[in-house]
Image: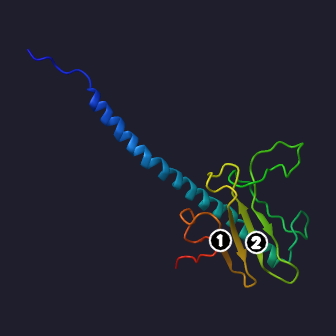
Amino acid sequence: MKSLQKGFTLIELMIVIAIIGILAAIAVPQYQNYIARSQVTRVMAEAGALKTTVETCILDGRTTLGEGTDKCQLGATGSNLLTGTANNGDPALPSTKVGVPQVTMPAEGQSNAKIEATFGNNAATTLKTKKLTWSRDNNGTWTCTTTVEAKYAPASCPVEGATAAP
Protein backbone atom coordinates (compact mmCIF):
# COMPACT_ATOMS: atom_id res chain seq x y z
CA MET A 1 0.00 0.00 0.00
CA LYS A 2 1.29 3.47 -0.87
CA SER A 3 1.73 5.99 1.92
CA LEU A 4 0.39 9.48 1.37
CA GLN A 5 2.83 12.35 1.44
CA LYS A 6 2.28 14.65 4.40
CA GLY A 7 3.78 18.16 4.26
CA PHE A 8 6.39 19.66 1.96
CA THR A 9 9.77 18.33 0.99
CA LEU A 10 12.90 20.23 1.86
CA ILE A 11 13.54 21.18 -1.77
CA GLU A 12 10.03 22.64 -2.11
CA LEU A 13 10.57 24.80 0.98
CA MET A 14 13.99 25.95 -0.30
CA ILE A 15 12.45 26.96 -3.65
CA VAL A 16 9.76 29.03 -1.92
CA ILE A 17 12.35 30.74 0.30
CA ALA A 18 14.53 31.52 -2.74
CA ILE A 19 11.57 33.06 -4.59
CA ILE A 20 10.68 35.20 -1.56
CA GLY A 21 14.31 36.32 -1.27
CA ILE A 22 14.48 37.34 -4.93
CA LEU A 23 11.21 39.27 -4.69
CA ALA A 24 12.39 41.05 -1.53
CA ALA A 25 15.72 41.98 -3.16
CA ILE A 26 13.81 43.70 -5.97
CA ALA A 27 10.90 45.15 -4.00
CA VAL A 28 12.70 46.78 -1.06
CA PRO A 29 14.90 49.17 -3.11
CA GLN A 30 11.94 50.07 -5.33
CA TYR A 31 9.84 50.82 -2.27
CA GLN A 32 12.59 53.05 -0.83
CA ASN A 33 12.78 54.97 -4.13
CA TYR A 34 9.01 55.39 -4.08
CA ILE A 35 9.13 56.75 -0.51
CA ALA A 36 11.89 59.24 -1.39
CA ARG A 37 10.01 60.46 -4.49
CA SER A 38 6.80 60.90 -2.51
CA GLN A 39 8.67 62.86 0.19
CA VAL A 40 10.13 65.24 -2.40
CA THR A 41 6.66 65.79 -3.86
CA ARG A 42 5.24 66.39 -0.38
CA VAL A 43 7.91 68.98 0.49
CA MET A 44 7.38 70.63 -2.88
CA ALA A 45 3.69 71.06 -2.05
CA GLU A 46 4.31 72.17 1.56
CA ALA A 47 6.85 74.81 0.52
CA GLY A 48 4.74 75.80 -2.48
CA ALA A 49 1.79 76.49 -0.20
CA LEU A 50 3.71 79.50 1.12
CA LYS A 51 3.85 81.09 -2.34
CA THR A 52 0.36 82.55 -1.94
CA THR A 53 1.19 84.17 1.39
CA VAL A 54 4.52 85.53 0.12
CA GLU A 55 2.82 86.85 -3.02
CA THR A 56 0.14 88.60 -0.95
CA CYS A 57 2.76 90.18 1.31
CA ILE A 58 4.77 91.44 -1.67
CA LEU A 59 1.67 92.92 -3.30
CA ASP A 60 0.71 94.60 0.00
CA GLY A 61 4.24 96.03 0.38
CA ARG A 62 5.05 93.99 3.49
CA THR A 63 8.53 92.66 2.75
CA THR A 64 9.71 92.19 6.33
CA LEU A 65 8.93 88.90 8.08
CA GLY A 66 7.55 88.97 11.61
CA GLU A 67 4.50 89.84 13.63
CA GLY A 68 2.68 93.13 13.38
CA THR A 69 0.37 94.85 10.96
CA ASP A 70 3.20 96.13 8.77
CA LYS A 71 5.06 92.78 8.61
CA CYS A 72 4.50 89.57 6.68
CA GLN A 73 3.23 86.71 8.83
CA LEU A 74 3.75 83.43 6.99
CA GLY A 75 1.87 81.08 9.28
CA ALA A 76 3.94 78.13 8.02
CA THR A 77 3.08 74.71 9.39
CA GLY A 78 6.01 72.55 10.48
CA SER A 79 6.96 69.40 8.58
CA ASN A 80 8.72 66.37 10.01
CA LEU A 81 10.65 66.04 6.72
CA LEU A 82 12.46 69.37 7.08
CA THR A 83 15.41 70.38 9.24
CA GLY A 84 14.87 72.55 12.26
CA THR A 85 12.83 72.37 15.39
CA ALA A 86 9.52 73.94 16.21
CA ASN A 87 10.94 75.39 19.43
CA ASN A 88 12.82 78.08 17.43
CA GLY A 89 16.12 77.12 19.05
CA ASP A 90 14.88 77.78 22.61
CA PRO A 91 16.38 75.01 24.79
CA ALA A 92 13.67 75.58 27.41
CA LEU A 93 11.01 74.39 24.97
CA PRO A 94 10.69 70.75 23.90
CA SER A 95 11.91 69.91 20.42
CA THR A 96 9.21 68.46 18.19
CA LYS A 97 11.53 67.55 15.29
CA VAL A 98 9.69 69.62 12.71
CA GLY A 99 11.05 72.35 10.51
CA VAL A 100 9.59 75.00 8.24
CA PRO A 101 10.76 76.31 4.87
CA GLN A 102 12.98 79.37 5.12
CA VAL A 103 11.66 82.43 3.29
CA THR A 104 13.80 85.25 1.93
CA MET A 105 11.73 88.32 1.15
CA PRO A 106 12.76 90.82 -1.54
CA ALA A 107 14.99 93.80 -0.90
CA GLU A 108 13.62 97.32 -1.08
CA GLY A 109 12.29 98.08 -4.56
CA GLN A 110 12.54 94.45 -5.67
CA SER A 111 9.85 91.80 -5.94
CA ASN A 112 11.93 88.62 -6.07
CA ALA A 113 11.63 86.14 -3.20
CA LYS A 114 12.80 82.65 -2.26
CA ILE A 115 11.28 79.77 -0.28
CA GLU A 116 13.89 77.13 0.61
CA ALA A 117 13.16 73.78 2.26
CA THR A 118 16.04 71.62 3.55
CA PHE A 119 15.38 67.90 3.98
CA GLY A 120 16.21 66.43 7.37
CA ASN A 121 14.63 64.87 10.47
CA ASN A 122 12.39 62.02 9.15
CA ALA A 123 13.25 62.39 5.45
CA ALA A 124 14.73 59.42 3.58
CA THR A 125 18.47 59.07 4.14
CA THR A 126 19.25 59.81 0.49
CA LEU A 127 17.43 63.16 0.79
CA LYS A 128 18.94 64.52 4.02
CA THR A 129 20.65 67.91 3.62
CA LYS A 130 19.28 68.28 0.05
CA LYS A 131 17.24 71.38 -0.76
CA LEU A 132 14.10 72.29 -2.67
CA THR A 133 13.72 75.95 -3.62
CA TRP A 134 10.85 78.02 -4.98
CA SER A 135 12.18 81.26 -6.50
CA ARG A 136 10.16 84.28 -7.59
CA ASP A 137 11.60 86.61 -10.19
CA ASN A 138 10.80 90.32 -10.48
CA ASN A 139 8.07 89.50 -13.04
CA GLY A 140 6.17 87.42 -10.47
CA THR A 141 6.98 84.01 -11.97
CA TRP A 142 7.66 81.19 -9.52
CA THR A 143 10.08 78.39 -10.47
CA CYS A 144 11.10 75.30 -8.54
CA THR A 145 14.56 73.70 -8.41
CA THR A 146 16.03 71.03 -6.20
CA THR A 147 19.35 69.43 -5.31
CA VAL A 148 17.99 65.89 -4.85
CA GLU A 149 19.05 63.16 -7.29
CA ALA A 150 17.25 63.37 -10.64
CA LYS A 151 15.44 60.07 -10.07
CA TYR A 152 13.62 61.58 -7.07
CA ALA A 153 12.83 65.00 -8.58
CA PRO A 154 9.33 65.70 -9.91
CA ALA A 155 9.12 66.77 -13.57
CA SER A 156 7.90 70.22 -12.53
CA CYS A 157 10.82 70.74 -10.14
CA PRO A 158 14.04 69.84 -11.96
CA VAL A 159 17.46 69.33 -10.45
CA GLU A 160 19.48 72.57 -10.31
CA GLY A 161 21.19 73.16 -13.63
CA ALA A 162 18.69 70.97 -15.52
CA THR A 163 15.64 72.20 -17.38
CA ALA A 164 12.06 71.16 -16.72
CA ALA A 165 10.38 68.75 -19.09
CA PRO A 166 8.00 70.48 -21.53
Q: Position of residue 18 (x, y in %)?
A: 35, 38
Of label 2 and label 1, which has the lower sequence position?
2
Kind of residue at disc 2: Lys
Q: Position of residue 67 (x, y in %)?
A: 89, 62
Which residue lies at the image location 56% right of the left edge and 62% below the top edge?
A: 152
| Element under disc 1 | strand
Q: Quadrant of residue 140?
A: bottom right
For label 1, the crowd category at 10 Å Cα-Cα, with few meaning under 14, some 14 to 19 and many 20 or more, is many
Whether 113 is drawn above or below 17: the answer is below
Q: In this orientation, which residue lies closer to the viewer: 48 or 127?
A: 127
Q: Quadrant of residue 107?
A: bottom right
Q: How many numbered discs sit on the rendered protein?
A: 2
* Marks 2, 1: nearer the viewer: 1
Q: Position of residue 26 (x, y in %)?
A: 42, 49
Which residue lies at the image location 56% right of the left edge and 59% below the top edge?
A: 37
| Element under disc 2 | strand
Whether 27 is drawn above or below 59: the answer is above
Q: Which residue is mark 1?
A: 145
Would residue 128 be found to the left or right of residue 5 on screen?
Answer: right
Farthest-out residue, top: 1
Would residue 32 be found to the left or right of residue 47 on screen?
Answer: left
Q: Position of residue 165 (x, y in %)?
A: 53, 76
Q: Quadrant of residue 110?
A: bottom right
Looking at the rendered image, the quarter that the N terminus falls into is: top left
Figure colour scheme: rainbow
Kind of residue at disc 1: Thr
Q: In this orientation, which residue lies closer to the viewer: 23 or 108?
A: 23
Q: Which residue is mark 2?
A: 114
Would residue 68 be found to the left or right of residue 82 on screen?
Answer: right
